[in-house]
Image (cartoon, helix red, strand yellow):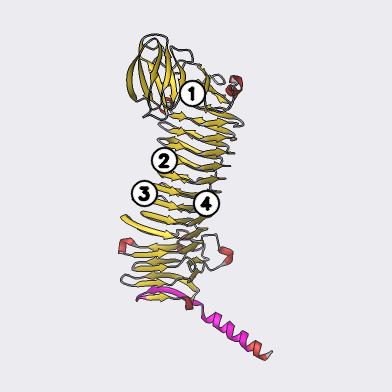
Amino acid sequence: MKKSLITLSFLANFISFGQTNVSGGIYQNTTWNLAGSPYIVTSSIVVFPGNTLTIEPGVEVFVTPDYSFNTGNLRYIEIRGTLIALGTENAPIVFKSAANENQGSHSWMGLNIKGSQGATFQMNNFKIFDSYYGLYNDIGEPGVSYNFENCHFKNNNYAIQLNADMNYYNCIFESNGVGQAAQLAYGSLTATNCQFLNNFCSFTWSNSVNVTNCLFQGNQNNIVGSPGIFDNCQFIDNEFAFAETYGHTIQNCYFAQNTIGIDNSGGSNISNCTFEYNNIALKIGDNTSISNNQIVNNQIGVAVTAYNPNITIISDNKICNNTEFNLQNLTDKNFQVNANCFCSQDSTYIESFILDGYDDITRGLVNYAIYDDFCESILNYVVKVQLGELSITNLSFENSIQLISQNDQFLVINSDLDQSISLFNLSGELISTMQFKRGYNQLSPTYLSGIYFLISNSGNGRLKLVL
């Protein structure tokens, strides 16, 4: 029994020896090693110019709260010289509050890099918890890149405030006010295999982003601004998956259980995505293209807010079984959505899920097509309003040119008269002009793929082609 007590006493002494209190200025090169961990910051730390603080892998840094109730008195670690904090995947470096009851309450200021005084830092495989400003620099850094792997930012007011080219791999941003703050002076964001969970904003107003294979779940205004590319990402249970979206390419993504999937002000391309069980899947503005998406089982599928909907492309989407509306025209403009399937051959049923001028005279009218049960072939067009004699959006079902047959090599098209015909792509670009004779005409557009329109130059016919 006596031997056991001696052993326990030695162990207790060893644990006590492993804790190191630190405070004040660092005036010479200093290393915080694993043997001295955890390091308890009892007052603010400043690394002065010309000196380096090196923190070894696995070290934990606990910052004690300042209870003066003045945000300006929050304790901080300020770098005017150099910080080297390179953890490993299995031994990350941790910065957090020392008090369990204050975790998540932003009880210390963060890591302040004084770039204005020549400060530099190297960090990787680290965690920052419970801070107000996270990791921040007081200057912009054009042309400077930081690569962060296996990092974790949790319960910070701001996690990252760096105006540089940021590259994140396998990082977690969790329960922060803002994950990466606005890059007003300079900066870009690249994220791969990252998770953004339960933040108020995951990131805001980056100048250019490239985000691949990331999960965004439980956030509020998840992504604000920040034009660029999002590929193969999941957006689940966010208030706004995208807010104030402009200049985005969003492809191969999954949106579910969001209040609003994409709130788009214009200039974006959204393709090959699935939207389901959202309150509103998409709100789209001017000069936006949404194509080849599955927009099903939402409350509202597509809400069009564009000032000029006729320069907004809604094409080759399956917009079906949305409980309130498949499509809302929230403008007073007329437009067509002929190249989309609404999963019914009953025009009355389709009409009941389209909000337009038939329901509210302040709205414009919407023309659409009726597809077969497989969403492959158009059976008829519903034309509520003529959209212009040569508009490619005006696809009257009764016209002087009709598709007779089609295979991989050629199309057979009947013309009711001798006439000049133009071929346009979906953007309205003229591809070619040809002469049709009365009767059957054969075309071999083997070099084309996608949606095209044949339009009579005399205004006598229009025909959509899916090649």
Judge the density around disc 3: few (<14), some (14-19), many (≥20) Cα neighbours within 10 Å: few
Q: Residue furthest right?
A: 1
Image quarter hosting the C terminus: top left
Tag in front: 4 or 1? 1
User: x, y percentage for residue 167?
Assistant: 40, 55
| Residue type (three-letter) at the residue carrying disc 3 | Leu
Assign a secondary structure to mark 3: loop
Q: CA distance from mark 4 to mark 2?
A: 21 Å
Comes first in the chain, label 2 or label 1: 2
**Label of residue 248 in the image:** 2
Assign a secondary structure to mark 4: loop
- Residue 413 in which image quadrant: top left
The residue carrying mark 1 is: 338
Q: Residue at x 35, y 68 (%)?
A: 82
The residue carrying mark 4 is: 199
**Label of residue 426 in the image:** none
Q: CA distance from mark 4 to mark 1?
A: 39 Å
Assign a secondary structure to mark 2: strand
Q: CA distance from mark 2 to mark 3?
A: 18 Å
